[in-house]
Image (cartoon, grey):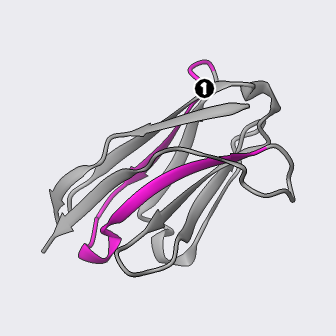
Amino acid sequence: QVQLVESGGGLVQAGDSLRLSCAASGRTFSIYDMGWFRQAPGKEREFVGRITWSDGSTYYTYSVKGRFTISRDTAKSTVYLQTNSLKPEDTAVYYCAARLQQYGTYDYWGQGTQVTVSS
């Protein structure tokens, strides 16, 4: 089992930045990668990006590329989502998730953290 806890959300203005954290515990040695997702009110959950636990390689969805950066601190078993140049359309609950296999499903999820961007 893997447990995930997000933090760092808040209310900011357009153009501001936030750094979200996701602390993992449990069988962290089993993690293949960790992803960030978001869900805006009335919309389906959207993939934001992911980072491979072993080598730190990253992948982002087009809408956040160049503005968001995912990093990890393996010693702290923590993944970060640095969000810059935030836009009102980035408003959502942000979730981190973990999967144990490269082509598996994200079976472990955090509780989410709210990011609200005002115009």
Q: Who's the residue at 64% across and 55% down the image?
A: 50
Residue 94: where, in percent of width, then height? 43, 56
In the image, farthest residue toward the top: 75
Q: Please identify the quarter of the rendering in which residue 25 is found.
A: top right
Q: Is residue 83 above or below residue 64?
A: above
Q: Who's the residue at 68% across and 32% down the image?
A: 2
Front one among 44 and 85: 44
Q: Is residue 75 left or right of residue 88?
A: right
Classify the position of the N terminus by image quarter: top right
Residue 106: where, in percent of width, then height? 72, 54
Q: Who's the residue at 39% across and 44% down the image?
A: 20
Q: Is residue 22 left or right of residue 88?
A: right
Q: Is residue 26 above or below residue 94?
A: above
Classify the position of the C terminus by image quarter: bottom left
- Residue 110 among those drawn in magenta: no
Q: Please identify the quarter of the rendering in which residue 61 is found.
A: bottom right
* Tag count: 1
Q: Who's the residue at 51% across and 78% down the image?
A: 44
Q: Is residue 47 above or below residue 26?
A: below
SS at mark 1 in the image:
loop
Whether residue 14 is visible here, answered yes or no, is: no
Callout 1 amino acid: Ser
- Residue 84 among those drawn in magenta: yes
Q: Which residue is mark 1?
A: 77
Front one among 33 and 65: 33
- Label 1 packing within 10 angstroms: few (<14), some (14-19), many (20+): some
Residue 108: where, in percent of width, then height? 66, 45
Start-end of magenta stretch: 75-99
